[in-house]
């Protein structure tokens, strides 16, 4: 196991060392100490590493992750796991805005709450939030699944494409073209599997499903007020 | 009315035929008009400037014999691997989706022959353009369609797009007829949707966040790639200052004459400012920060000739970018297509329905049969020829001004033909020392 102490070296050193694991794998287990809210920790990793960040992280933690499993023992700033392609990111605390933004794959688990625009423009990632999420979450969500064990803020799923959203608690309001949809057996099964992967002991039957009404997929004069 | 005074039809300047037709079209359809290209109205432009050739007070360089350099290095501020181009004319960002794969490949081929760069667009990087582009700039857009760290690492530079000249403040669109299986797959969208692109980036807001975003991309790419920031010209003085403060290596400034694949006509014609007045504001911002020539400035929006290239560089640009002109070089609006264009309600020289995918030139389409009409090798050859002409023309003018490199052109080599262009370009009205708006 390798330990990088960010009180002794720069973020550049951490990321360079992690990137070098693609060409020469020295160690699969990495621990980052004294992160102290620094930005851009473990970004652009492209190897099946296990990275433990022991404290709070700033913006874009685990951004564009490929293959790695990253655990943050604290809170994270804006854009955790943004544009992630694969792998897994777990936040033990809460996340700021744009968690999992535009991400194409992998699993993002936030044990606490997530701020506004959680899952904005998500393109295939699975996001499971133990607490609640803020307004405009899943705006223009294209693919993947978003699971919320708490409540959702205003304008959930505005201008949604094909992301499926599951919320256990209340939804303050739905965005344009986002509607509640029936929970069929395959959805209960899908949700159970996501909750299991996230390690949350919740009953899928307590959730509601939301998705796109697909009325804004093509421009229509009658929908002008929704744009 | 008597026979002595036959009726004269007087067209209203306010309600001219075009305006009447647009009101009638709007009343019929209930939705705004969408088209491609840039502004069609006449705005102050490089034609309103003249270069001052040498005579007694300056002496010229011998045409064809004395060297006039054309190369440019982009990204010298922070990047470990700046881009060294042979010519200062680059190909602007245009997406696969807006353009056919053949057109993208042709752009790459032409640019590579000429020793310059080409640029991806909304929707990601295709193997065709990466394979054929010696220098490829990868755009990082609000939609992040097709954004992939593997492609980020394959790129030679990264361009963070905040806006474009045809529609500063607006997001992109790609209508359903062009969202084919391949385009939809690259963008993770359902086939045939009218794709709406966001106008703001999803995970940062404002210049302080942009600095962190730029740092993230530098970290991901190990500080190797130059990072450009592209701005649609509206408030270039402030935008350039903020982009430089955020850490940009290169500023790309696109004026309102810059084209788009599809946007509302009203947006194209009424938002943003001409590139002529945007360049001096950007240069002033760079000079005040002691960053002129350290952060390179690429300008675009209506570049057509070597004279435009020379004048843009004389105003302080390090390089220019072309989009619409490059498509014309490939074969867009060619006279041989006139009959076919008339069948779809247009004509050669007028076609701007780039949004609807029926381009008989095979350029702004995803129709496989139409796309096949464009031979990427021949298209690349035509583009390379055009680029050569642009550079030869610019060199001719620079030599006449006594300059041994295009970068040595400066505002003192310019005068303006009109009061408006003198004020905007901040060069004297021809025959005077008067620069409107400035003390002298």
Image: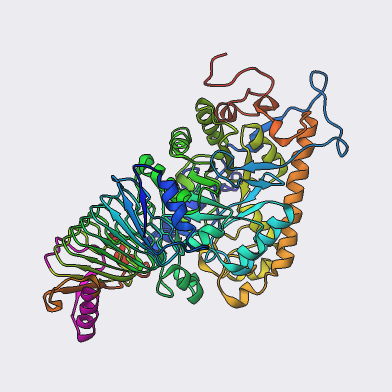
Left or right of B189? Residue B113 is: right
Total numbered circles:
0
Q: Position of residue A173 (x, y in %)?
A: 16, 61
- In the image, B354 versus B190, the foreground residue is B190
- Note whether B268 is above or below B379 in the view shown: above
Residue at x 64%, y 17% (from the top left corner): B433
Question: Would you say B73 lies left or right of A68 here?
Answer: right
Residue A191 on the magenta span: yes
Span of residues in magenta: A169-196
Residue B229 screen position, x and y as percent: 49, 45
Compared with residue B252, is residue B338 higher up or lower down, i.e. above or below? below
Q: Residue furthest bottom?
A: A185
Can residue B306 be seen at all in this image of the molecule? yes
Q: Residue at x 57, y 64 (%)?
A: B99
As drawn, is B163 to the left or to the right of B432?
left
Q: Is residue B13 above or below residue A152?
A: above
In the rendered image, residue A43, in percent from the top left (x then y), is placed at 40, 55
**Quadrant in which residue A102 is drawn:** bottom left
Query: In this orientation, which residue lies closer to the viewer: B12 or B144?
Result: B144
Instruction: In the rendered view, tell whether residue A63 sits above or below residue B72.
Output: below
The way the protein has been coloured in the rendering is rainbow
Residue at screen point 17% across, 64% down: A130
* Quarter assignment of residue A140: bottom left
Q: Is residue B224 magenta?
A: no
Image quadrant holding the C terminus of chain B, namely: top right
Residue B96 lies, in percent from the top left, at 54, 65
């Amino acid at each position: 196991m390798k330990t990088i102490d960010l009180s002794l070296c720069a973020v550049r050193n951490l990321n360079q060392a992690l990137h070098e694991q693609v060409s020469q794998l020295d160690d699969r287990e990495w621990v980052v100490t004294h992160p102290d809210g620094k930005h851009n920790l473990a970004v652009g990793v492209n190897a099946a590493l296990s990275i433990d960040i022991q404290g709070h992280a700033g913006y874009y933690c685990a951004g564009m992750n490929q293959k790695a499993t990253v655990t943050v023992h604290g809170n994270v700033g804006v854009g955790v796991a943004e544009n992630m392609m694969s792998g897994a990111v777990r936040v033990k605390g809460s996340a700021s805005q744009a968690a999992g933004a535009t991400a194409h794959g992998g699993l993002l688990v936030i044990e606490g709450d997530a701020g506004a625009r959680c899952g904005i423009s998500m393109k295939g990632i699975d996001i499971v939030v133990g607490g609640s999420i803020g307004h405009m979450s899943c705006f223009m969500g294209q693919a993947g699944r978003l699971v919320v064990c708490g409540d959702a803020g205003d304008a959930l799923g505005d201008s949604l494409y094909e992301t499926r959203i599951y919320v256990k608690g209340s939804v303050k309001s739905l965005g344009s073209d986002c509607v509640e949809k029936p929970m069929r057996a395959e959805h209960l099964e899908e949700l159970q599997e996501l909750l299991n992967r996230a390690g949350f002991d919740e009953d899928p039957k307590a959730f509601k499903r939301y998705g796109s009404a697909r009325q804004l997929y093509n421009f229509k004069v009658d929908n002008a007020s929704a744009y | 009315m008597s026979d002595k005074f036959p009726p004269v039809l007087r067209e209203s300047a306010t309600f001219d035929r075009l305006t009447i037709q647009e009101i009638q079209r709007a009343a019929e359809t209930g939705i705004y008009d969408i088209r491609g290209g840039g502004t069609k109205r006449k705005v102050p432009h490089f034609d309103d400037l003249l270069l001052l050739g040498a005579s007694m007070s300056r002496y010229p360089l011998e045409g064809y014999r004395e060297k006039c350099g054309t190369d440019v290095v982009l990204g010298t501020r922070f990047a470990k691997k700046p881009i060294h181009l042979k010519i200062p004319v680059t190909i602007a960002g245009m997406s696969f989706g807006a353009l056919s794969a053949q057109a993208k490949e042709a752009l790459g081929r032409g640019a590579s022959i000429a020793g310059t760069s080409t640029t991806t667009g909304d929707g990601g990087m295709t193997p065709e353009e990466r394979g054929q582009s010696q220098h490829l700039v990868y755009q990082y857009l609000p939609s992040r369609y097709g954004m992939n760290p593997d492609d980020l690492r394959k790129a030679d530079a990264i361009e963070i797009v905040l806006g474009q000249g045809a529609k500063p403040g607006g997001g992109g669109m790609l209508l359903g007829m062009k969202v084919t299986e391949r385009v939809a797959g690259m963008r993770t969208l359902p086939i045939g949707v009218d794709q709406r692109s966001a106008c703001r980036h999803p995970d940062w807001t404002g210049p302080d966040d942009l600095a962190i975003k730029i740092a993230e991309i530098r970290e991901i790419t190990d500080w190797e790639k130059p990072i450009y920031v592209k701005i649609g010209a509206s408030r270039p003085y402030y935008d350039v200052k903020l982009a430089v403060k955020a850490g940009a290596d290169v500023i790309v400034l696109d004026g309102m004459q810059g084209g788009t694949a599809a946007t509302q006509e009203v947006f194209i014609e009424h938002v943003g400012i001409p590139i002529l007045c945007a360049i001096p504001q950007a240069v002033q911002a760079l000079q005040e920060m002691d960053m002129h020539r350290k952060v390179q400035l690429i300008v675009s929006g209506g570049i057509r000739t070597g004279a435009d290239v020379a004048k843009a560089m004389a105003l302080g640009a390090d390089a220019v970018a072309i989009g619409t002109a490059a498509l014309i070089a490939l074969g867009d609006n060619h006279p041989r297509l006139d009959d076919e264009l008339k069948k779809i309600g247009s004509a050669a020289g007028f076609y701007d329905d780039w949004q609807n995918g029926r381009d008989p030139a095979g350029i702004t389409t995803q129709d496989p049969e139409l796309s096949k009409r464009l031979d990427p090798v021949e298209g690349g050859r035509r583009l390379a020829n055009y680029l050569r002409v642009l550079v030869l023309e610019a060199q001719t003018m620079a030599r006449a001004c006594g300059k041994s490199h295009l970068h040595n052109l400066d505002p003192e080599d310019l005068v303006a033909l009109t009061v408006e262009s003198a004020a905007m370009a901040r060069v004297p009205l021809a025959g005077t020392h008067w620069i409107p708006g400035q003390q002298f």
